[in-house]
Amino acid sequence: QVQLVESGGGLVQGGGSLRLSCAASGSIFSIAVMGWYRQAPGKQRELVATVTSSGTTNYADSVKGRFTISRDKFKTTVYLQMNSLKPEDTAVYYCNARTSSTFGGMVYWGKGTLVTVSS
């Protein structure tokens, strides 16, 4: 089992920055990929960024150049640095973890943190 707890959301003006954190606990050794997804009102949940256990990152086109995903050296916390925020970035941001196939390819979600960007 993996538990995920997000923090760092809030209200920010357009053009501003926020940093989200996701603390993982439990069977951390089983995690292959961690990432952030978001869901805006009335829309489907979408990928924002992911980082693998080896450090490979992937970003949605809409956030490339503005957002940066990173992990601490112990691989227990994932961060999402969000710069040049736009009103369309407003959403609930969810942390996600996927275990390797060795551990069943399980998917875990945090409860989410709300990011609101004003115009």
Image (cartoon, helix red, strand yellow):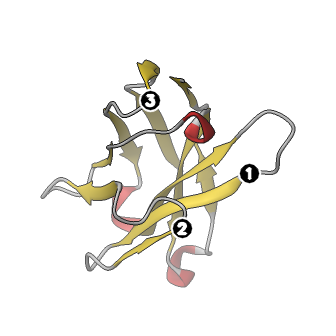
Q: Amino acid at mark 2?
A: Ala
Looking at the rendering, in which quadrant would you find the C terminus?
Answer: top right
Q: Position of residue 27 (x, y in %)?
A: 41, 55
Eye-nearest disc, 3 or 2: 3
- Tag nearer the camera, 2 or 1: 2
Q: In the displayed structure, does residue 29 sit left or right of residue 99? A: left
Q: Residues within 10 Å of mark 1 (few under 14, many from 20)?
A: some
- Percent x, y of residue 93: 56, 39
Q: Is residue 111 visible?
A: yes
User: Which residue shows up at 35% across the image and 55% down it?
Assistant: 66
Name the N-terminal-most of marks 3 and 2.
3
**At 45% from the left edge and 32% from the top edge, which residue is drawn?**
5
Which disc is residue 45 wearing? 1
- Outermost residue, left side: 73
Distance from label 3 to label 1 (Cα)?
22 Å
Judging by the rendered image, the residue that carries numbered circle 2 is: 60
Decide which of 76, 64 is in the foreground and name it: 64
- Name the secondary structure under disc 1: loop
Q: Give the amino acid at mark 3.
A: Gly
Q: CA distance from mark 3 to mark 2?
A: 19 Å
User: Element under label 3?
Assistant: loop
